Image (tube, rainbow, N blue to C red):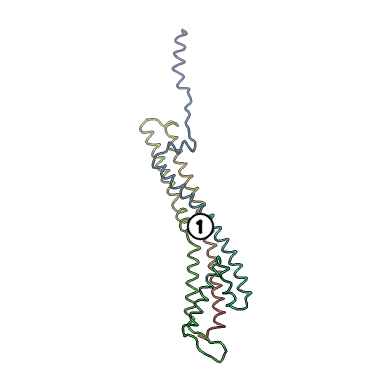
Amino acid sequence: MTLSSFFVSVAEAAPANTKVVVKTGIFESILQANIFVQLLLLIMIVLSVVSWAIIFTKYKQLKALKDANEKFSDVFWKASSLESVFERVSDHSPSNLGRIFRQTYLELQRIAESGLATKTNLDAPRLSGLDNLERSIRKGIETEVALAESRLNFLATTGSTAPFVGLLGTVVGIMTSFAGIASSGSASLAVVAPGISEALFSTAVGLFAALPAVAGYNYFINQVRRLEMDLNSFGSDFLNIAKRNFFKGE
């Protein structure tokens, strides 16, 4: 073999031994992804950001509400009369117990001024129209529970839909890989890697958006149910106090 033929044979064998470098990093996967997959990734990232914002704000809201309720409850049970509590209720506006008390106490005053009071042998008039007071308490509780539950539906929606949005991106990524194989006639790593990479990344982003949303929703809905129990308990206590002191037997 001559020297020239040796170099020719080496040159022909070199491409077969050359390593093909395929970039499969996160940013490369996003940049190389199908425009439809990029749109799905953007949607899931927005869902995740909004979900985390709701989780942080809702945690602060419910914690502040719990602290405010504890302070008002302490004032309520230590007070000598409902009038003295009403005089101080404006200092406890962050408490939903305080808001329910204020609304119900004003309803109690309206009942007393509406001619539903009847004179008895006791010094104080006795009232009728207990149903009105019960409706006022129930309406206040429903309003406060709805306020505490606000934006939790977004977490539930994100938790239930984000995995399917990610799955849709996965399907599109795999279809892209098959289309590359069909157009090139090769199933090499350089052909299938971009599509597989964007498919797996789409699945990961969908799970990343869904898992915190589901966990946050389950935690907060449990906190809201406890809050509702506290509101119902306070409403029953207030109603019993009013019934004993202001209403005639009905």
Quarter residue 12 falls in: top left
Q: What residue type is labelled 1?
A: Tyr
Secondary structure of the residue carrying tag 1 is helix
Horizontal arrangement in the rendering, residue 16 relative to residue 62 (left or right): left
Which residue is under mark 1?
Answer: 217
Q: Residue furthest left?
A: 183
Q: Which residue lies furthest to the right in this view?
A: 78
Q: Which residue lies furthest to the top in this view?
A: 2
Residue located at (49% from left, 84% from top): 128
Picture coordinates of residue 18, whole percent (x, y):
47, 23
Picture coordinates of residue 219, whole percent (x, y):
54, 58
Picture coordinates of residue 243, whole percent (x, y):
54, 82
Horizontal arrangement in the rendering, residue 207 relative to residue 79 (left or right): left
Q: Taking 78 as reference, is 30 above or below it? A: above
Quarter residue 62 falls in: bottom right
Q: How many labels does the image show?
A: 1
Instruction: Return the residue nearer the eye: 242 or 174.
Output: 242
Q: Taking 189 as reference, is 171 above or below it? A: below
Residue located at (57% from left, 89% from top): 123
Q: Taking 30 as reference, is 71 above or below it? A: below
Picture coordinates of residue 241, whole percent (x, y):
57, 79
Q: Taking 20 as reference, is 35 above or below it? A: below
Local packing at callout 1 (Cα closer than 10 Å; few below 14, some 14-19, many 20+) is: many
